[in-house]
Image: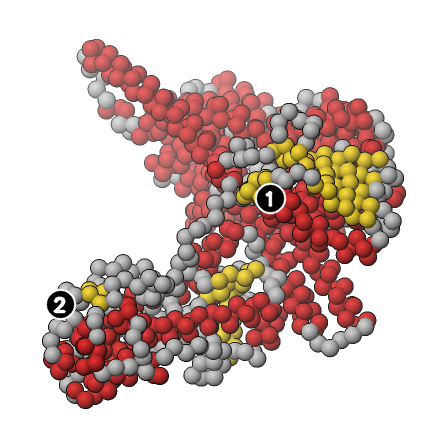
Amino acid sequence: MPILIVSILFSAAARCQDTSVTDSLLRQLELSEADSSRVNTYLALWYQYYRSDNMKALEYAGKAKQLAEKIGYTQGQAVAAYRLGSQYNRLREFDKAKIEFNISIALAKSVNDSNALASALAGLARIHRENTAIDSATAAYLEAMAIFESSGDRNAVAMIHNDLGNLYKRQRLFGKALSHYKKALEIVRKLGFLPGISACLTNIGAVYQEQGKHDEALSFQEEALGIKREMGDKLGEARVLHELGNIHRLSEDYEKASDHFRSALELAEELSQQDLIAMARYSLGFNEFQRGNYREAIHYGELVAAQENKNLATMAENHEMLAGAYAALNDFEQGYGHSVLAKKYDDSLYNEQRITLSSELEAKYQNEKNQKEIASLNAAREINILKLQKQRSERIYLIGGAILVFLLGIVIWNRYRIKARTNKKLREMDQVKSRFFANISHEFRTPLTLILGPLQELQKKDFHGDKQSLYQVMQRNSRGLLHMVDQLLDLSKIESDKMVLQAVKTDLRTFLKPVTAAYESLAQSREIRFDFKMEDDIDLYIDPEKMEKILHNILSNAFKFTGKGGSITLSAGVSDFTQKQQAQVSIKDTGIGIAPQELSRIFDRFFQAGNGSAQQYKGTGIGLALTKELVTLHHGEIDVSSVSGQGSCFTILLPMGKAHLSRSELFVPANSPAPAEPGIISGSSFPATESRHSGSTISRSTISGRKKSPAGETRTPEGAETEHGLPQLLIVEDNIDMQAFLGQILKPHYRVSAASNGLEGLEKARELQPDLLLSDVMMPEMDGIELCRRLKLDENTSHIPVILLTARSGKIPRIEGLETGADDYLTKPFDADELLVLLKNRIRQRALLRERFSREITLQPKDITITSADERFLQKAMDIVESNMGNFEFNVQAFIEQIGLGRTQVERKLKALTGQTPVEFIRLLRLKRAAQKIAGKEDSISQIAYSVGFNNLSYFAKCFKEQFGESPSAWSKQPA
């Protein structure tokens, strides 16, 4: 059996069909017998047709595979399967191509044909690349490259580098793409392999074109053109000419672009390449369109439209160009028709994948069949052909039933897979959109914080006159920019269904009064009459925050377009013009009005009135679009009427009652009290504590309600100083300017340390044990959410109050931060005074908790549920003391060893949570237990003192009186 030689060439640069060779092969086919040489002839014919005639190439590869399988020519079958896969790939039937490549891989392994295996792996990698399975594609390419390198096939190694370049180019990783293309070019130049050289030159030129480096792109493409002409590759020459035309068009050298496109068109027509003919004609038309020669553009565009062309992308772009050209010639009817066709082809392009799925069931069945054939290839000869007819019939029935069940399973599974894939894509799109707008918010809000914050500090200084007014102008415009950013984010939330209505019952008159009051001073300064009219009392279910945005957007426009001496009226009442009961809010002005042709577009996103009188009032075109969306969110309607030069009237209709609202759209205020600070103190309700020794209970009043000595009196904590002077504050912020600004405003009040990312912040928090930690959310290495979560889970740091400072607005990021245990959450841009007050309150609250602990701590029962790291630490500390209550030898060293942390960590943590040293903590718990026993008259005072670890009665009496203000004997005489 002759050895089959597998040739691997660049698919993008192989030569066109050689007619004389084809004729010779066809004659050879007529003379050959059904053996391996005939298989090789089929494969050689595939090579002649694989670029010029897809169907003939597919036919010869199929015949080669069928014959090879019939005669047991496994090596030929492996190569034929690879070439079938390559042809299906060219036809973009990726599922069929994948099946054939997998068959080729299995067969190549069975006969140890490394070259066939590597070729099939490379083919499979291209399918992964088309399906955007980047990791799988890269792995397959590298495996194929390793095989080719070990076999010394340098041309094939160059092919893999070229394919890897294509992979990275598709991901727009142009640096990596160029690296692989240039490695491939270096290899094929040494080999003198012209098709490979031209392919690499073309690809490198395409990358430079994508990067906008037109001179470099021209240099490589022109060299590629020379090689194509030297090879006589007219199809390749036509494609390079087309690319050169595109480069000249992008460089605005439209004359040269036109020459190259015409040359490409002539060659494409000579070769009858319909797709390339359509591309060249479209490019000529678009080139003329950009030059303003709209009739010439229409000429070429109509030729493309009349042509039978399967390239949906070209057709969509062509009709879009035609629509623009006709519109430019004021033929709007034709323009609209082509616009509709462009949309139709765009939709067809989007649904192309779904259309191809209809053949997937057959492909999956064929794949299963082929896999079974491969598995049984070598075993087929050993099957006993003399089985009884009855057994054969039963087997046929069994296989038929199994296939039926299998097909049914595939149908069900396929439907589920398509649905799951669609849902996954939608979720991914939502996540990408959410991440994009979160990042945009961060990128805008952080610089705005660094503008507004310093401005606020400057305004506190004693500046007058021009400087003060300049600062006010800067601050006002910065806040205006922030308002526009917020409006854009609101639009994005509505678009992605992330904005939720939170409606509450609202008295409309009460709601509207502060809104109108906010504009009274503006009306006076502008000498505009501003009236508010409302006769009926109306209760509505509205979202106050969103309704304020609606009214402020309309009112701000009314004041913008109404001149001195004009009037604006806001009126509210029950609508008389609808059958269903609705509230009506109208805002009428006597401003410049809106032109009739613009009324229908006034609520369109980014639309700006274009009439002459409105040109001086430039806006963004966001406010009214957002207003309409927010009204729709309320299940309402908004309309506008206007007379140019006389004014406008915006009317909002809102349904009354709450029948139109879903449960999720109704805001239910939380009536339950806020959760207590983590720790063993539980707000105002302290549970009765049961003695483990006697079974008696002692209430909170028994411990802390009696008269105390001055040592036990409550002190109001200052919250501004610690034992080291100023409280220590750790700032975790990756923006150096923001870090410096925060340090500047906080250093007068705190000992400030800083970290540049979450990972560094975590290490510094463990090292410094600060009194407060202020962290940004979006940071490299580790974000603020993860930093907070780790701090709160670690016993060493769980007591540190964490305040998150972020540019992300909205409830969801805030809830996400608070759920990780953050103590508070402040949104950028923030007020410096607000930040200082917030930090001061946190210090004060922690001081109050320590004070409260020292006088009101209760001995908790063993079965209490522990929910936080602080509670777990304190519970463990209390349990250790409780279990050693009567041990005279139990001291601080033993206490720290049983806790299992370092001495410094224990001291810092106890001090932060209770305000006490370990010695004071142990003594306090012993005294509390003694007070409980004395109140319950469980034993004599001396025995009780011994039972709680005091072996010196006078020292016990002294400590007891200092803590509770009474001697042990006096305590025992009062009722429990």
Nearest to the observer: residue 613 or residue 221: 613
The quarter of the image holding the C terminus is bottom left
From the image, tell me which residue sits under label 1.
Answer: 507
Q: Secondary structure at mark 1?
A: strand
Q: Residue at x 24, y 75 (%)?
A: 928
Q: Residue at x 36, y 72 (%)?
A: 852
Q: Is residue 815 left or right of residue 745?
A: left
Q: Residue at x 82, y 45 (%)?
A: 567
Of tags 2 and 1, the one toward the viewer is 1
From the image, tell me which residue sits under label 2.
Answer: 694
Nearest to the observer: residue 537 or residue 456: 537
Q: Residue at x 73, y 77 (%)?
A: 462
- In the image, residue 900 lies at what x, y percent? 26, 73
Nearest to the observer: residue 738 or residue 356: 738
Q: Is residue 815 above or below residue 50?
A: below
Contact flag, marks 2 and 1 (Cβ < 8 Å)? no
- In the image, residue 496 lies at what x, y percent? 57, 41
Q: Which mark is residue 959?
A: none
Q: Is residue 868 left or right of residue 125?
A: left
Q: Is residue 240 visible?
A: no
Image quarter of residue 877: bottom left
Question: Which residue type carries mark 2?
Answer: Ser
Q: Secondary structure at mark 2?
A: loop
How much space separates mark 2 and mark 1, taking CA atoms?
Answer: 60 Å
Q: Residues within 10 Å of mark 2 (few under 14, many from 20)?
A: few
Task: Tell which circle, 2 or 1, labels the residue nearer the N-terminal end.
Answer: 1
Nearest to the observer: residue 541 or residue 61: 541
Q: Is residue 138 left or right of residue 515?
A: left
Total marks drawn?
2
- In the image, residue 46 lies at what x, y percent? 53, 27
Question: Which residue type carries mark 1?
Answer: Asp
Q: Residues within 10 Å of mark 1 (few under 14, many from 20)?
A: some
